[in-house]
Amino acid sequence: MIGLITPHYGNAIRQNKTCLSDIRKAAWAVYFHLRSSDEEPSHSLCSNSWHKHQNQVLEGSVETFRHNNKLPMVVMDAIKPVFNYLSQPKLQQKYLGDKTQNNNESINS
């Protein structure tokens, strides 16, 4: 599960490194993307640039889209507090300007 969430969350930060509100929106897009199902799609926060569902909405062919990476609701409910924490502006402020947590650039240095 962590391996599924981490790349999406990292991309959300890297692709929006200059705007705090865009980081927040992209982080929540990850949550709702993973929560989405064919019965309850939740892609309003997902970017048109990377999301197949949003692209198919634009093309008028969304009825052929199938969700294949949905996590169970019990899992999504359990990890929602983590997303709440990670979406705090004070924490996300550290991500601005392309600051990351790796050996070469550390938000703690």
Image (cartoon, grey):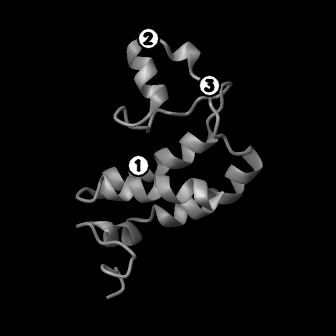
Locate residue 103, reporting x and y percent: 37, 82
Which label is found at residue 63? Answer: none
Left or right? Give the position of 18 relative to 60: left
Q: Quadrant of residue 88?
A: bottom left
Which label is found at residue 66? Answer: 3
CA gap between label 3 and label 1 equals 21 Å
Q: Quadrant of residue 70?
A: top right
CA gap between label 3 and label 2 equals 14 Å
Picture layout, residue 21 above or below residue 99: above
Q: Identity of the amino acid at label 2?
A: Gly
Task: Give me the residue at 46% from left, 61% from top.
Answer: 87
Per the image, label 1 sits on a secondary structure element best described as helix
Picture layout, residue 86 above or below residue 105: above
Task: Give me the residue at 65% from left, 25% from top.
Answer: 38
Q: Which residue is mark 1?
A: 26
Q: Of tags 1 and 2, which is closer to the observer?
A: 2
Per the image, label 3 sits on a secondary structure element best described as loop
| The C terminus lies in quadrant | bottom left
Q: Disc 3 or 1, which lies upstream in sequence?
A: 1
The reply to whether dot 3 and dot 1 touch (C-beta < 8 Å) is: no
